[in-house]
Image (cartoon, rainbow, N blue to C red):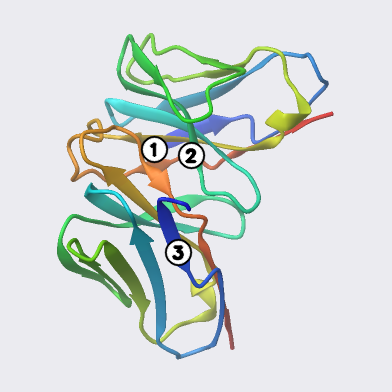
Amino acid sequence: NAGVTQTPKFQVLKTGQSMTLQCAQDMNHEYMSWYRQDPGMGLRLIHYSVGAGITDQGEVPNGYNVSRSTTEDFPLRLLSAAPSQTSVYFCASSRFSGLYSGNTIYFGEGSWLTVV
Amino acid sequence: KNEVEQSPQNLTAQEGEFITINCSYSVGISALHWLQQHPGGGIVSLFMLSSGKKKHGRLIATINIQEKHSSLHITASHPRDSAVYICAVLPYNTDKLIFGTGTRLQVFP
């Protein structure tokens, strides 16, 4: 198993450009999520999904879009990049949704995004 | 006030010392996670707790649900334990984890 695979690892964007961060897992996990990590702050939830075809907003969803057409993939789209979106992004998955509390969380390696 | 508070924010230790990192939270939870973030950025899960105590190698995690407090202990610390340790809680009836800001640990030889 590859676990959670996240690409790209590094990206520089110009303000206004769009891009997609890819996330894939091969563990048949129902729950997938995207977080951003900024200096001095805890990881913050952007969007999450509890299964194919189901997505919901997290704490900081503005400027981001997601879809979950398959169990394996959960891409994060930046619609029109802004300098405030400069951050480190992590994708994570777990077997079931959070209501099943006994689940290990698996994280991708992170994506460092700079918007200039 | 953050819903999840970790202390200390930064911690330095000599190799071999016993380390304690604390996590306090203000909401009712169904689970608490301890995570380790390596200097290169990758995050790995160490423990998931809903009650009591868990041990894995030199790491011990405890939780007191009534006091809304958890501790992560590292016995016989080693330089390879240098990392950021993150506490995250899962509030009741949600699918959304709330993260602490992390404790940066440096262990010197």
Same chain, labels 1 and 2: yes
Counting residues from the N terminus, which is met first, the one under dot 1 or under dot 2? Answer: 1
The residue carrying mark 1 is A3
Q: Residue furthest front?
A: B1
Whether callout 2 and callout 3 share a subunit is answered no
The part of the image, by quadrant, that contains residue A85 is top right
Q: In which quarter of the image is the C terminus of chain A?
A: top right
The CA span between labels 3 and 1 is: 28 Å
Label 1 chain ID: A
- From this viewpoint, is residue A11 visible? no
Spatial CA distance of label 1 from label 2 is: 8 Å
The numbered mark at residue B6 is 3
Q: Which of marks 2 and 3 is in front?
A: 3
Q: Which chain carries label 3?
A: B
Q: What residue type is labelled 2?
A: Gly
Camera-side residue: B105 or A41? Answer: A41
Q: Do the residues labelled 1 and 2 touch (CB within 8 Å)?
A: yes
- Residue A108, which numbered label? 2
Tag count:
3
